[in-house]
Amino acid sequence: MSASQRGIMREGGNMGRDPWVELEGITRRRFLARSLRFAGMLWIGHLLGGRLLGELNAQVPPERLTAFARNVVHGGPPKDGIPPIDNPKYVSAGEADKFLGPEDVVFGMDEKGTARAYPQIIMVWHEIVNEEISGEKLAVTYCPLTGSAIAYRGRSKVDGRPLTFGTSGNIVNSNLLMYDRQTDSRWPQILGVAITGPNLGQELEALPLTWTTWGRWKRRYPKTLVLSKETGYVRSYGYDPYGSYTSKRPSYYTSGGPFFPVMARSNRFPEKKVVVGVKVDHAVLALPKAEAASAGVVNFTLGGLPLVALYDKELDAVSVFARQHGGQELTFLRRGEEIVDAQTATTWSAGGRGMRGKLAGAQLKWVTSFDVMWFAWYAFYPETKVLVP
């Protein structure tokens, strides 16, 4: 067993609280509501459906779905008061330079050979982009309250019906609670599983979405498309009511606790520390991003699956892959500035692609993983394992 595998441990220290205690609803701080210029509260009256979950979702037991549903609180804006973008328009990298600086945060996606960038300064006002690429519906989502950007295929993994999403006006564990327009089922963004409605227990399939900066993404993908500010809405794009990720001044993103109650808390890390949350079926793990970046390569096993976390220096991003190819388990290591595997001496990109050697051209399978604030990951997954490289 490697040192990194021995470092995996079950997280403790929930400060004596019952992780699944029911909480009373608390509304968003008034200044935020004023900043967003929205008013009104949305009453949530969706009861859990009577369907049998059975094998619908092995990741989240039914009793937890019930607990999540009972801990939904009002977020301030009404349903779709934070309006999703349903007909996204795009501009070139050159046009995007007119409103994006090199250090501005973007969420990058390279899907079906086309790179797209979703600027955080736009996403903070909309939180969801309902996208369609090559006939397939996708949802690009961002929750500023939990620092999580996740792309999902626009269909459930069980029945495959196409779905589009809106903002419910409510949250759970301080996280965006989406609803699908086809059934009005409610889906916490981090969980990716419906907690109420006809789709109760169904799960969404995540896609790679890279949290990086505009300057870094543009260098990697100079022909990238960029989400336009022409959204059909009048918003103060460029102004963020929560503060800034890059300013040295304290903001919501860097200090303090969550605005809303959460179902479990841990003092293992600072609440706003960024971790890479990893999911493999029913197993979950938190990998502190800064430490993973410093290590460069982290081999570990989760849920019986050998995995590797690779740091992409150019994008300042950490991605997780299954470290198997053709039935062979691989062990990765850094050799200077290169990533190689010990079994075949193939040189790999930080994106999990074989570049030179025996496995040149091979692509490792991406595993669900995304940046998220520690408090939010732990609130949904108090049973999480933690790996500090």
Image (spheres, rainbow, N blue to C red):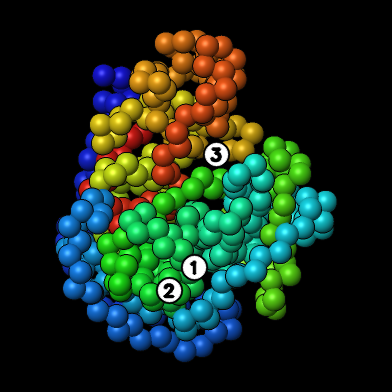
Which residue was labeled with disc 3? Answer: 317
> In the picture shown, does residue 380 fall above or below 88?
above
Q: Quadrant of residue 41?
A: bottom left
| Callout 1 touching callout 2 (CB < 8 Å) | yes
Task: Report the front residue among 294 and 309.
Answer: 309
> In the picture shown, does residue 250 fall above or below 290?
below
| Callout 1 touching callout 3 (CB < 8 Å) | no
Which residue was labeled with disc 2? Answer: 182
Residue type at numbered disc 1: Thr
> In the picture shown, does residue 345 fall above or below 321?
above
Q: Name the residue: 25% across, 54% down.
A: 57
Q: Is residue 70 left or right of residue 103?
A: left
Residue type at numbered disc 3: Ala
Distance between mark 2 and mark 3 Cα atoms? 34 Å
Task: For marks 1 and 3, give the one nearer the viewer.
Answer: 1
Which residue was labeled with disc 1? Answer: 164
Q: Can you tell which mark lies on residue 299?
A: none
Task: Report the front residue among 360 and 216.
Answer: 360
Q: Earlier in the sequence, mark 1 or mark 2?
A: 1
Q: Earlier in the sequence, mark 1 or mark 3?
A: 1
Distance between mark 1 and mark 2 Cα atoms? 7 Å
